[in-house]
Image (spheres, helix red, strand yellow):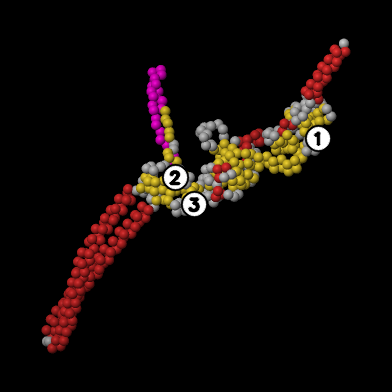
């Protein structure tokens, strides 16, 4: 009998212990602390400014292209192009110049001989004019009739000699001009050859500044259509299927056209980070928030920055197919330092400080419950718990700020207590602001102000 009573007592103790364990609730002592919340995401480094290397005029094909990712300095050769039109034109000009130079000695000799002949004729003409003037000394000794005949003849001879002299002088000027023209023509041809040679030299494109080379894919649209004919109910239906290709890698031997971009040279003196984030994180981010940046590809660089702007432009990260239902929103982060050590196109891990509240009441997020559509915490009162309505501020999956309803020193439950341990209270009904027709149509201006305008193209 005594053994039976002892066994019954042990069973009672075991049941009591199990009941106490089932009713035990883990608690948390409310206290003030600093609340810091981050959004962590990986972005892509890009240059704020980038120079596009374009195909020079009259270029036709790529002869050589510098490998992508090469670090270059100002003046380094980036690409060479060919131009059969320029080469052919230059060859023609050089041949014409050689032919023109071969005719110059004969032309100069012929011209000089003609000039010498004219000069001799002019000297003889001057002598004749001098004799005519000396002949005039006989006039006073002539009869009046002889004087009239002499005057008429002398005037005619002097006029003819003056005309002859002017004609010879004009021929002399013409011959001198001919020599000047020959020399000017040769000079013009040499200038044209120098210009063509300069154009050919421009077929070798050099870098305007230091940076890392980025190749450009040519975007184009090439469709292939297939038509099938089907017959339904006595009517023929034509179905067309098309397929398009929209990218081509530029390489040696590729035909190009003038003004086409083949390379980009980012300016490494100033870089930023482009982030594509889901909407849930995008809504937390605002301009000027501090960012902690880590770049593993550049030796683990650690630096800081700030959110430069957020846009309403959506984008697709690498590897995501077009048409995906997952929207990615763009955020740009400005970098404070270490620009020259960061390579555009590489990844950077960013921790955006979205909230930083000092000395406030912070509780674990698991301590918040919803009871009768009201957000509450269970405050310990002895072995029982009283549901207390609270108002919360910023929160994340692990911690939440309580702005109203709790005070330091209170103890709250981290799990919902059994119903028998909850003190019955009447909770206030949640106040809901009536929504007017205008409110349902007009967007919230406070949210719109948090968005920046879309980024202009570079």
How far separated are the C-alphas under marks 1 and 2? 66 Å
Residue 67's label in the rendered image is 2
Q: Which residues are magenta?
A: 218-240
Q: Are marks 3 and 1 in contact (CB under 8 Å)?
A: no
* Residue at numbered disc 1: 410
Q: Earlier in the sequence, mark 3 or mark 1?
A: 3
Q: Quadrant of the N terminus?
A: top right
Residue 174 left/right relative to 214: left
> Horizontal and vertical percent for residue 4?
85, 12
Q: Residue at x 45, y 41 (%)?
A: 217
* Residue at numbered disc 3: 210
Above or below, 146 against 220 in this view is below
Q: Earlier in the sequence, mark 2 or mark 3?
A: 2
Q: Residue at x 23, y 63 (%)?
A: 104
Q: Choose between 377 and 11: the one closer to the eye.
A: 11
> Horizontal and vertical percent for residue 458?
51, 47
Q: Choose between 16 and 240: the one closer to the eye.
A: 16
């Amino acid at each position: 009998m005594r053994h039976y009573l002892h066994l019954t007592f042990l069973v009672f103790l075991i049941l009591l212990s199990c009941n106490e364990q089932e009713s035990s609730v883990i608690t948390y002592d409310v206290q003030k602390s600093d609340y810091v919340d981050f959004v962590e995401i990986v972005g892509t480094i890009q240059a704020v400014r980038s120079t596009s290397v374009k195909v020079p005029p009259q270029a036709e094909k790529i002869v050589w292209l510098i490998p992508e990712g090469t670090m270059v300095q100002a003046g380094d050769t980036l690409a060479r192009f060919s131009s059969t039109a320029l080469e052919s034109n230059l060859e023609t000009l050089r041949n014409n110049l050689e032919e023109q130079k071969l005719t110059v000695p004969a032309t100069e000799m012929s011209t000089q001989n003609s000039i010498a002949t004219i000069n001799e004729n002019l000297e003889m003409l001057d002598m004749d004019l001098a004799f005519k003037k000396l002949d005039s000394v006989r006039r006073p000794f002539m009869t009046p009739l002889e004087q009239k005949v002499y005057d008429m003849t002398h005037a005619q001879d002097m006029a003819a000699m003056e005309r002859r002299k002017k004609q010879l002088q004009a021929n002399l000027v013409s011959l001198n001009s001919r020599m000047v023209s020959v020399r000017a023509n040769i000079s013009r041809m040499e200038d044209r050859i120098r210009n063509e040679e300069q154009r050919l030299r421009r077929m070798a494109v050099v870098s305007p500044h230091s940076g890392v080379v980025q190749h450009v894919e040519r975007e184009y649209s090439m469709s292939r259509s297939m038509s099938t004919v089907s017959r339904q109910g006595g009517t023929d239906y034509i179905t067309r299927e098309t397929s398009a290709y929209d990218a081509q890698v530029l390489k040696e031997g590729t035909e190009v056209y003038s003004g086409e971009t083949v390379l980009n040279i980012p300016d490494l003196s100033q870089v930023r980070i482009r982030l594509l984030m889901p909407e849930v994180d995008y809504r937390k981010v605002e301009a000027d928030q501090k960012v902690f940046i880590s770049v593993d590809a550049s030796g683990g660089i650690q630096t800081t920055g700030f959110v430069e702007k957020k846009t309403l432009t959506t984008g697709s990260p690498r590897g995501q197919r077009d048409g995906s239902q997952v929207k990615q929103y763009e955020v740009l982060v400005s970098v404070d330092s270490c620009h020259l050590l960061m390579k555009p196109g590489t990844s950077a891990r960013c921790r955006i400080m979205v909230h930083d509240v000092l000395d406030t009441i912070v509780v674990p997020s698991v301590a918040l419950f919803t009871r009768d559509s009201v957000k509450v915490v269970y405050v310990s009162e002895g072995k029982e718990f009283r549901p207390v309505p609270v108002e919360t501020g910023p929160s994340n999956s692990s911690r939440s700020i309580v702005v109203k309803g709790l005070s330091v020193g209170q103890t709250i439950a981290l799990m919902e207590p059994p119903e028998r341990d909850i003190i019955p209270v009447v909770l206030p009904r949640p106040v809901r602001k009536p929504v007017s027709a205008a409110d349902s149509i007009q967007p919230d201006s406070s949210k719109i102000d948090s968005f920046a305008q879309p980024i202009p193209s570079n």
